[in-house]
Image: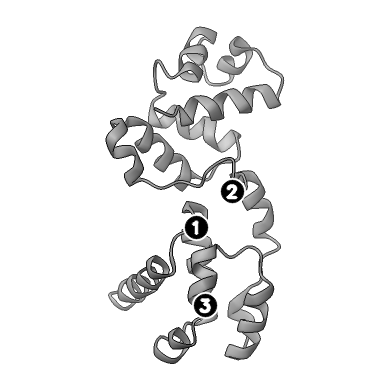
Amino acid sequence: MKNYLGDIIYSSRQKENLTQDQYGSRYNVSGPAIFKFEKGYVKPSLELWLKMAADAGISQRRAVLLWVKSKLPDEFQDYIELQSAAIAESEAEYAKKKGKKPDYSKFETREQMREVIDKDKTLPKGLKELLEDDELWALYKPTGHEINLLRDMFGPLGRGSSNAYREALRLTREFAHSF
């Protein structure tokens, strides 16, 4: 079983060059508690984990998913997909890129959007594949706002497939029309 929380706590503590006692004092827990978290013997409460995750530059959404995944038995952990740390950029890097992402809602035509989509490195692979599909544009006619929403809400969760992003677009529209 992968110790996601412990690995993040350990990395965060090492980056700041803190002992377990020093790191624990930030959160009103002991050094031995930090040791147990890092080794995976004990999981921090959700409230404590959210504080630690925020300090490590992890979004609240991703932190909750990591915490839930860590609580599941091994055979069910694959039900919650997360980006592989070895392959995907870290959450902090993703947050830094957020300011550099194109705002598709500012484009007036589909052609302008598609030109930028071809060059946009911040789009997850599944979303990019979906947006390269001519049939999508003919049937769904996604707006720039919807593209931004799909990228920013679902991108941090993982690559996803083009079908998953198509379903996310459909659900996003369904929720938007229900209010």
| Residue at screen point 47% across, 82% down | 142
Q: Secondary structure at mark 2?
A: loop
Q: Position of residue 72 (x, y in %)?
A: 30, 33
Mark 1 → mark 2, Cα distance in angstroms: 9 Å
- Dot 3 corresponds to which residue? 131
Whether residue 35 is visible to the viewer of this picture, yes or no, is yes
Left or right placement of residue 47 versus residue 106 in this view: left
Q: Amino acid at mark 1?
A: Arg
Labelled pair 1, 2 in contact (Cβ < 8 Å)? yes
Mark 3 → mark 2, Cα distance in angstroms: 21 Å
- Dot 2 corresponds to which residue? 88
Q: Amino acid at mark 3?
A: Leu
Quadrant the C terminus occupies? bottom left
Q: Is residue 128 above or below residue 57?
A: below
Quadrant the N terminus occupies? top left
Q: Which mark is residue 159?
A: 1
Q: Position of residue 61 (x, y in %)?
A: 45, 47
Crowd tier of the residue under label 3, counting other residues whose Cα lies within 10 Å: few below 14, some 14–19, many 20 or above = many
Q: How many marks?
A: 3
Left or right placement of residue 56 versus residue 5 in this view: right
- The residue closer to the viewer here, 45 or 132, is 132
Q: Is residue 3 above or below residue 83?
A: above
Whichever of labels 3 and 2 marks the residue nearer the N terminus, that label is 2
Q: Is residue 103 above or below residue 94?
A: below
Labelled pair 3, 1 in contact (Cβ < 8 Å)? no
- The residue closer to the viewer here, 149 or 166, is 166
Whichever of labels 1 and 2 marks the residue nearer the N terminus, that label is 2
Crowd tier of the residue under label 2, counting other residues whose Cα lies within 10 Å: few below 14, some 14–19, many 20 or above = some
| Residue at screen point 59% across, 34% down | 55
Q: Amino acid at mark 2?
A: Ala
| Residue at screen point 58% across, 15% down | 25
